[in-house]
Image: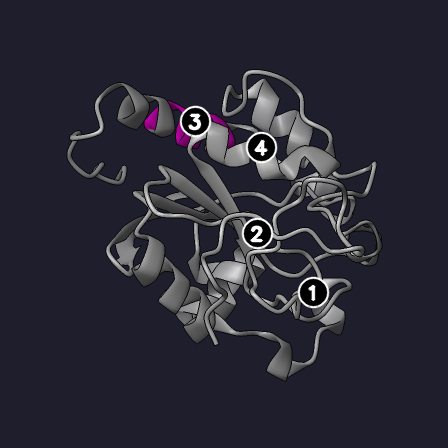
Amino acid sequence: MIPSRRNVTTTTDLPPGAPDLTGSGEYLVPDVLRPGLTLVLVGTAPSRISAAARAYYANPGNRFWRTLHEVGLTPQLLLPQEYPRLPEFGIGLTDVAKRHSGVDAALPGHAWAPDELRAKLRAHRPRLVAFTSKRGAAETLGVSTGRLPYGQQPQTLEDCELWVLPSTSPLGQTHFQLAPWQALAARVQELRGNPDAPDGVPAS
C-alpha cells in the first residue's frame, strides 16, 4: 500500500512538527516524499536507535547528517529530528524496509519491499534516487552488492537517475568514502541551477 500524500499529520508518537506521510502510521519512521524533489535518499531500514527516536539516522555515531552538510547538500548541519526540513533543499527520504528496524544482516527476508519503493518513485518522480548503502540497492535491483560500484549507475530506476553511496553507518566506517557523496552533491547542484539539464552519463 502506498502512503498517503497528505502534507502534515502529527501524532503523539512523532517528534513535534514531523510529517506522518504514511496515512496510517504503519512505518517506524515516516517517509518524506512529495512530487518535484531533485533527490530521494533511500536507506535500508531504521536502526533501533532511529526507530526509537522516530527520526532518520539518529545514531550519534552515524555520519549521515554531517556528510549532507559537508558535501553541500544542506546549507547547515541538521539534527536528526529536523529531517522534515529536507524538502526545503529538494531532498526526500525513505527506506527499502519501512516496517522493521535493526542491522541489515538481521532483517528477515520479508522486511524488504522493493516493489513498494518503486511505486513511490513512480508516484513522486524525483530526478535522482540514491541508495545510502549497497545492500538497499542490491535488494531493490536484485543483484549482488559486489556488482554495484559506488557512484552513478548505468541503469535508471523507474526513470530516475540512479546512484549508490557508501553507508554512513558506524558499522561501515572503515569502508566509508566521501568522494561518491561529493559527486552526487555536484550533480544535485547542477540540477538545482538548471532543472532541464540532461541525464548525466556514468563514468566508464
Q: Which residues are magenta?
A: 181-187
Instruction: Please tell me which of labels 4 and 3 falls first in the chain.
Output: 4
In this view of the protein, can residue 177 be seen by the observer? Answer: no
For the residues labelled 1 and 3, say whether their Cβ atoms are less than 8 Å apart. no
Q: Residue furthest bottom?
A: 110
Characterize the magenta stretch by its predominant secondary structure. Answer: helix
The residue that appears at 48% across and 43% down in the rendered structure is 92
Q: Amino acid at mark 1?
A: Asp
Expressed as whole percent of the image width and height from the top left, the position of residue 156 reads: 27, 55
Left or right position of 58 against 201: right
Instruction: Please tell me which of labels 1 and 3 falls first in the chain.
Output: 1
Q: Amino acid at mark 2?
A: Ser
- What residue does disc 2 label? 133
Density class for disc 3 (Cα within 10 Å; few <14, some 14-19, many ≥20) is some
Instruction: Please tell me which of labels 2 and 4 falls first in the chain.
Output: 4
Please tell me whether mark 2 or mark 4 is closer to you in this view.
4
- What residue does disc 3 label? 185
Instruction: Please tell me which of labels 2 and 1 falls first in the chain.
Output: 1
The residue that appears at 48% across and 55% down in the rendered structure is 6
- What residue does disc 1 label? 104
Expressed as whole percent of the image width and height from the top left, the position of residue 131 reads: 49, 51
Instruction: Give the spatial CA distance, label 4 vs label 1.
Output: 26 Å
The secondary structure type at the circle numbered 2 is loop
Identify whether 38 is placed above or below 195: below
The secondary structure type at the circle numbered 1 is helix
Q: Amino acid at mark 3?
A: Ala
Instruction: Please tell me which of labels 2 and 3 falls first in the chain.
Output: 2
